[in-house]
Image (tube, rainbow, N blue to C red):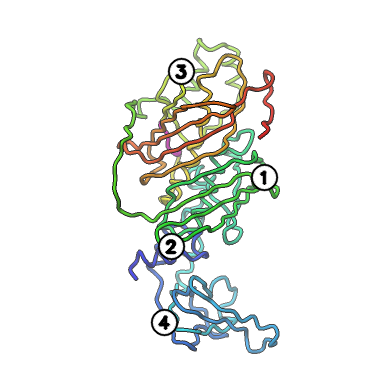
Amino acid sequence: MDREEVTEFLGQVPLLQCLPGSSIRRIAEAVQVKHYESGDYVAREGEPVDGLCIILDGQAEVSAPANTEETNRPDYVLNKYDYFGYGTNSSVHQVNVTAVTKLTCFVLPSQYGHLLQTKTIWNAEETAENHSLLEQILHLEKLEVDIFRGFTLPEAPTFRQVFGGQLIGQALAAASKTVDCLKLVHSLHAIFLIAGDNNMPIIYQVKRERDGTSFATRKVEAKQKGLVIFTLIVSFQKEELGFEHQAAIMPDVPPPEQLLNMEEIRERRLTDPRFPMQYRNSAAKKKFVPWPIEMRFCQDSGSQHKPSLYYWFRARGKLSDDPALHRCVVAYASDLLYSGVSLNPHREKGLKTYSLSLDHSMWFHKPVKADDWLLYVIDSPSAHGGRGFVTGRMFNRQGELVVSLTQEALIRRAKTPGQTPRPKL
């Protein structure tokens, strides 16, 4: 096996899938190959543990120590992707492991055990606190195989309910940590079921629907209080060469360096005499929490009634170089100001509205760097029956179409001025 094949194999071992891709690649460089004949001892009770052993091919049997009562002997068989020698508090083997058939194993020597102890699911060396707030938001706690826990961080901007982009990004992060690191998301389809509670953790349970040579499919359920609040279907693909064309053309807009960011726009509005003094005073008193996404708008206020919106965006701060992380960040950002574009033609003074994402789909066409500027082109071709429909395209600075999106959202007029009723779905 060459290095990429070893990396791909290790990426399918559940124990390793939650590690950063960089760690799996380093493990692929460090592992040794060992062969055993049927009947050979792979590990003997009382002998030193020499490292993590992962079965590549064949079967092995685990048997309890000889002094264990016959009725309590927990003999069982290890198959491909199973492992032993990790997680024990002892420096010696507590059981016997015997090859049932011809057996081939990868062994990670004990001196490389630190590669299994990473700071975050995205970075092997540094803690999440040293990176972008977005990387902290998208860091999940692994509870057990295929079950993760995420949080709404107090430093992050909050809405009435859990931000839809957070659910998409965290659920995608959970799914990404159950496939090998050579497969990356190419499409996802989300359904929002119940508004999430910002003050409660979110449990993400991943179901492995399919694992193929080129593609893998995952279903993720996000739960709070025992209820499913959100579901996500994700398809992953191993990179391959193929036909290419691009008919979509990036709009001719100013570069981000020539545009104002949200903080600068806010400061101008606070001092702009065209805005009522009451509005300026009220806005100045509100605590301003910068979003973890930096945004620069291409259109002025005169275009706010058009069913379209163009803006540049990128993650604030430093991101680890894991390609899966960058796609999760883009997924998080994709829900910012998205469905609201379908309300633009209907905005009028004093109008109170309520909007809630219903479903959301994304297709990743090309590699994407979320800490580089991306142009988000949003259009709303239709609104009807209390639902607004929006489409989106994301271009990199070279004009390449990297992501396409669609979303439908609930958009309703509030029943009374100043009151925002909870929608009945």
Residue 250: name its quadrant: top left
Q: Nearer the viewer, residue 279 or 216?
A: 216
Alpha carbon distance from label 4 to label 1: 49 Å
**Residue at the spot of label 3:** 301
- Mark 2 or 3, closer to the camera: 3
**Residue at the spot of label 4:** 35
- Mark 2 or 4, closer to the camera: 4
**Quarter of the figure that contains the N terminus:** bottom left
Q: Earlier in the sequence, mark 2 or mark 3?
A: 2
Give percent across and percent down for residue 331.
48, 42
Taking 397 as reference, is 230 left or right?
Answer: right
Number of numbered discs on residues = 4
Alpha carbon distance from label 2 to label 1: 32 Å
Answer whether residue 417 is visible to the viewer in this image: yes
**Residue at the spot of label 2:** 24
Circle 2 crowding by C-alpha within 10 Å: few under 14, some 14–19, many from 20: many
Under tag 3, what secondary structure?
helix
Alpha carbon distance from label 4 to label 3: 70 Å
Residue 335 sits inside the magenta stretch: no
**Quarter of the figure that contains the C terminus:** top right
Question: Disc 4, disc 1: CB below 8 Å?
Answer: no
Question: Disc 2, disc 1: CB below 8 Å?
Answer: no
Residue visible at 34% across and 26% down in the picture: 253
Taking 393 as reference, is 228 left or right?
Answer: right
Give the residue type at disc 3. Ser
Residues rendered magenta in the picture: 312-316
Give percent across and percent down for residue 89.
60, 73
Give the residue type at disc 4. His
Give percent across and percent down for residue 102.
44, 83
**Residue at the spot of label 1:** 200
